[in-house]
Amino acid sequence: MSFDYLALQVTTGILLAPIADALKINRTKVDCAKKLSTVLMFFVLLLLYAPNGITANGTTSAETTTTTTTTPSRTATLLFWSRFGDGVYLGPPRTFATKGAWQDIMGTDKSTGFSWPVKALGADFSGVQLIAIDPITPSTIENYITNEIRPIPEADGKNELVQTVKIKGSLGQAGSQAPLLIKRPWTIGDVNDLYITYWFKYPADLISKLDSGVSSANWRTQFSLKTGGYNNTGEGDYRMSVTVMKGTDGKLYWMTKGDNLGGVFPTRVDYWRIDNRAVPVPLDQWFRFEVYWHRSADIDGRFWAAVNGKVIADYRGPNMGDYGLPITRIFVNDSYSGGYAPVESRTAGLEIWSGFPCGVGESCHLK
């Protein structure tokens, strides 16, 4: 596939795929020289007449207009995109309970045109949930959890969301956490297909913060989702998660699984589990995390995750709970661990799509 063909598909969308097909050429020096000017002419004309002000990076000037990109068997829609750029900020913690509060992410990201809070998926909250092991107040919450949006020191012109849990309990306890959360009502139905990707960075000392010799001290959450709505409450019947584990050999690995820890059941049941020791857990470096799911009570269910383009799990099969409840909580990432504090998350470049944007089952790591 030529570069020009890819550019036409990605930039202008599904309606122009037939034209892009007509312009496919073999990548010989002669053919490229002959066809390049023709391709560029078509490209310029199409941009002039393309609706909704489509820009060169595939976004639109109006946030309500979504961007599409074609794949061999489906179309994925860009639902949300934020670089935590200029215009995005954290509101003050609010709605305090005894051991928790909420902190909204707000504002329009000038680098992408999308606005916080996330409007996609029918979300009623998108920001950082603050959960503390002890009772907290507005004057004490920062002793336990701090969040900030700041420039990335090692990447000029780019911003990151930093979540830090300072006090979480003793080793083996996970009494405090700070998830980047998208929450939605159970009354509006399920999220049947979704793809999420972002850049993430773990501290260099993550290995020493986890302890496989102490009960419940050997894990650190990367991603999870939970259902809700049982008897019209927030309680759910299913969870899917990706977790960093420390083995008895002292090495880190990825654990991905589906279980019943959505809130209804007091005893955990693991329905499926995939341990991946082949794909490294990157430390002290930015890596791209990707996750996709298709919900089903049958064999066509799927949960897929990749790190730097390498698949760490691709489960095929049922992924619904006993009561068939919808997804209500998507923990994009979570500063949540049984190991030593502080528990830190650094996140950049969040994208949410309706399906695989780079081809079914294909990573977008280098695209």
Image (cartoon, grey):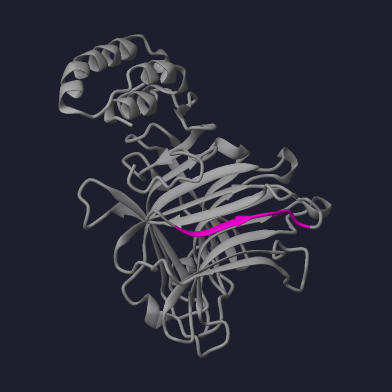
Specify the farthest residue to the right: 231
Q: Quadrant of residue 310?
A: bottom left
Say which residue appears at 62% left-offset and 51% top-offset. Answer: 302
Asked if one can make out residue 59 in the rendered structure from this viewpoint, the answer is no
How far across and how far down the image is residue 15, in percent? Answer: 46, 17
Closer to us: 350 or 134: 350
How far across and how far down the image is residue 289, in percent? Answer: 43, 55
Which quarter shows the C terminus? top left
Q: Quadrant of residue 308?
A: bottom left
Closer to us: 296 or 289: 296
Describe residue 198's horizontal placement relative to residue 119 as left or right: left
Closer to us: 152 or 91: 152
Residue span colored magenta: 311-321
Say which residue appears at 36% left-offset and 9% top-offset. Answer: 49
Say which residue appears at 59% left-offset and 48% top-offset. Answer: 293
Which quarter shows the N terminus? top left
Say which residue appears at 32% left-offset and 15% top-offset. Answer: 47
Measured along the vertical axis of the image, is residue 338 above or below residue 293? Answer: below
Describe residue 246's horizontal placement relative to residue 173 as left or right: left
Closer to us: 340 or 116: 340
Specify the farthest residue to the bottom: 213
Q: Total marks drawn? A: 0
319 is within the stretch colored magenta: yes
How far across and how far down the image is residue 225, in percent? Answer: 61, 56
63 is within the stretch colored magenta: no
Measured along the vertical axis of the image, is residue 239 above or below residue 171? Answer: above
Measured along the vertical axis of the image, is residue 36 above or below residue 307? Answer: above
Asked if one can make out residue 97 in the rendered structure from this viewpoint, the answer is yes
How far across and how far down the image is residue 194, in percent? Answer: 56, 43
